[in-house]
Amino acid sequence: MNVQKLRLAQIGSGYWGRNLVRNFASLGVLRAIADVDTVSANALARTYDIPRVTADYREIVGSDDIDAVAIATPAETHGRIAAACLAAGKHVFVEKPLCLDVAEAGRLSADAAARGLTLMVGHVLLYHPAFVALRAAVAAGRIGRLRYVYSNRLSLGKIRTEENALWSFAPHDISMILALTGGLPERVATHGGAYLSPGIADSTVSYLSFAGGVQAHIFVSWLHPYKDHRMVVIGSDGMIVFDDTAGGPGKLQLYRHVVNVSGPVPTVDKVPGEPLAYEAAEPLARECAHFLDCVTNGATPLSDGREGIGVLRVLDACQRALVAGVPQTLA
């Protein structure tokens, strides 16, 4: 199928969905928007010259003139809507998380495979040019053996009441960490606090332990005085910092600090950071184009159903650890 002949509908056009609308419209494939807020959806349709708006996503599911859908609705609805779309023979892009249940995610992935349909999860930072360059540098051994990773995703808002900060923010960091380590952690521990809404954690810190001794931790919060989206990757021969709040060459820096342990007390020789080159491109634009390429050419998405399941398994274990107050192994 030619990309320009692909007919896609956007289900959910709110806070994040409107960004998907913009990108899929620019790629020339968007034919319809489904959203209960038809006033907002119609405004978007006028802006991007989209011919069709409906308040009921089921109208999209039953349409023979739609080949694929992008889902950006509340997380608790992802699984139900994705299942209906797959059953109707449509390729599916669904914003993170794939759904809220590991078993349900497995059924979605298996159903897509059985029907020969593309199922892709919106783990957008896997497509960030700076992370792509970081991942390539680690794989090429530029910092030696991977030792540990820490990732901060902090800001003031957007505060949610239907899901906690772990489920809202951490999927991004988990997807990147799993891409760097190449496997799932054996054990996780999570601690957090609910300060604004009972039972909804506003901040969490998660510790991930991998086979071979690699460690990672993830700090997420929507109750933080400033924005900090930063990943630090430590290896035996160097360190890389991906600071997504920085611009230009400051976004991705390689450090080759030398730690001398030959004497009675370790000493550190610090050196300036070395900028790592990365492509200038919008991560979401790359992600949307990748989905269309996978649909039209039958390629497997970088963030396919299996990758989505892996992220969900880690999220599920972290949530269990948060509730129980003790570390958990992955089920």
Image: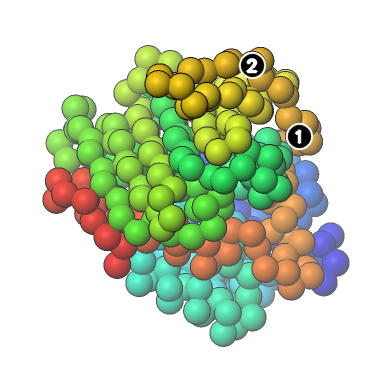
Which disc is residue 271 wearing?
2
| Residue 217 appears left or right of 254 | left
| Residue 199 appears left or right of 72 | left
Please state which of residues 58 and 172 is positioned toward the viewer in this rendering: 172
Please state which of residues 102 and 73 is positioned toward the viewer in this rendering: 102
The amino acid pointed to by label 1 is: Tyr
Which residue lies under the disc numbered 1?
278
Q: Which picture quadrant has residue 216? A: top left
What residue is shown at x 58% (from left), y 24% (from top)?
Answer: 258
Could you tell me residue 280's position as x and y percent? 78, 32
What residue is shown at x 37% (from left), y 33% (from top)?
Answer: 220
Could you tell me residue 73's position as x and y percent? 46, 51
The amino acid pointed to by label 2 is: Val
Could you tell me residue 67's position as x and y percent? 68, 69
| Residue 75 appears left or right of 93 | left
Could you tell me residue 183's position as x and y percent? 49, 60
Mark 1 to mark 2 CA distance (whole Å):
21 Å
Which disc is residue 311 wearing?
none
Q: Is residue 253 above or below residue 92?
A: above
Q: Is residue 257 above or below residue 51?
A: above
Q: Dot 2, crowdedness within 10 Å: few (<14), some or many (≥20)?
A: few
From this viewpoint, is residue 67 visible? yes
Q: Identify the image quadrant of the C terminus.
A: bottom left
Q: Dot 1, crowdedness within 10 Å: few (<14), some or many (≥20)?
A: some
Q: Identify the image quadrant of the N terminus.
A: bottom right
